[in-house]
Image: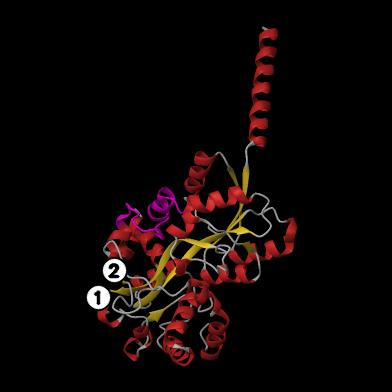
Amino acid sequence: MQRRLALRTAAALTLALAAAASLAQQPVLNLYSARHYHTDEALYEGFTRATGIRINRIDGDDNGILSRLKSEGAASPADVVLLVDAARLWRAEVDGLFQPVKSELLAARIPAQLRGKDEGQGAQWYGFSTRARVVVYDKTKVQRTDVDTYQELADPKNKGKLCTRSGSHPYNVSLFGSMLEQLGPEKTEAWMAGLVANMARAPKGGDTDQIRAVASGECQIAVANSYYLARLMRSDKPEDKAVVDKVAVVFPDQSGIGTHVNISGAGVARHSKNREAAVRFLEYLASDSAQAYFADGNNEWPVAKGIKISNPALESMSGGSFKSETIPVSIVGMNQVKVQQMLDRVGYK
């Protein structure tokens, strides 16, 4: 019996060592990611199944990742950098943290306005999903026609009704950068001052907090990214259902330039030691399956055309589609310094 036990132990040890050796030999892609969505695990597992390349993910916020890349320099192990805001992608590009990628597949599937700078060698980064900056309002107290453009949010008719998160948060900075491109500096600053004048309370919290504030009566109008509302719409919690029942949503400027969208985007790290696998990962994110996942798994809008989605919340809030702005997100990112100066002048906290 002791001999059989010893043989079984030896066999188990051999299998464990073989598994460890196999794992060590498996190709690895080092991903620095600012996406903090547990549902993305399925997205990454799909890439590994399709390619045999294992993903080693290092999470952090956008600023932390950019700081880490700078401090690591040429010694950085990062292969792909995945960020969740246009301004941060632009900053990474300006700081030289990406390398250009020329891919026929990416050029065909990713709209030109959702890519980084391209000087003939390929774009520095590509956007793979979007989230719309929508207006959520109390459907019993506010008329849809009073909030169906961004400019109306600053109109005196909405005085004391508005709530937002911090003006300096990247989601708002990107929206304001878009408005700056549309209206010019003078009109944009006047518009931002109007937003401050219309606040029901000082900016605080996140986008979900703004939606809840409308439902509770703390304010009557809020600005939020669409996927925060979609999460509440898909929730089974009674308190979330109660919030959804009290609010309505509008995609602003459908008769004009279109609703502002922000993006999740990625690029190959400047000092990637595994460029081929990194490019394969970017191309995977543009695939039909990954694009559908962004919508169905995390309530975002796919960027490639013709993607069939099965997300009742997205379909309900937009009727299946909406007109989005076509301002290049790189230009929106470039405007962030001017926007911050305006925020300071108008007292937008």
C-alpha span from label 1 to label 2? 8 Å
Residue 257 in the image: state x and y as whole percent. 35, 78
Q: Residue at x 37, y 86 (%)?
A: 160
Q: Nearer the viewer, residue 346 or 26?
A: 26
Provide residue 18's location: percent of width, then percent of height. Answer: 66, 26
Left or right? Give the position of 98 relative to 244: right
Q: Which residue is mark 1?
A: 140
Upstream in sequence: badge 1 or badge 2? 1
**Image marks 1 and 2: residues in contact by CB distance under 8 Å:** yes
Task: Tell me: 2 left or right of 313.
Answer: right
Q: Amino acid at mark 2?
A: Lys
Q: Which numbered circle lies on residue 246?
A: 2
Q: Is residue 19 above or below residue 301?
A: above
- State the colouring used for the structure image: secondary structure
Q: Quadrant of residue 207?
A: bottom left
Stretch of the chain drawn in magenta: 286-312
Q: Position of residue 346 (x, y in %)?
A: 51, 90
Q: Nearer the viewer, residue 311 or 220?
A: 311
Front residue of 12 and 165: 12
Q: Quadrant of the N terminus?
A: top right
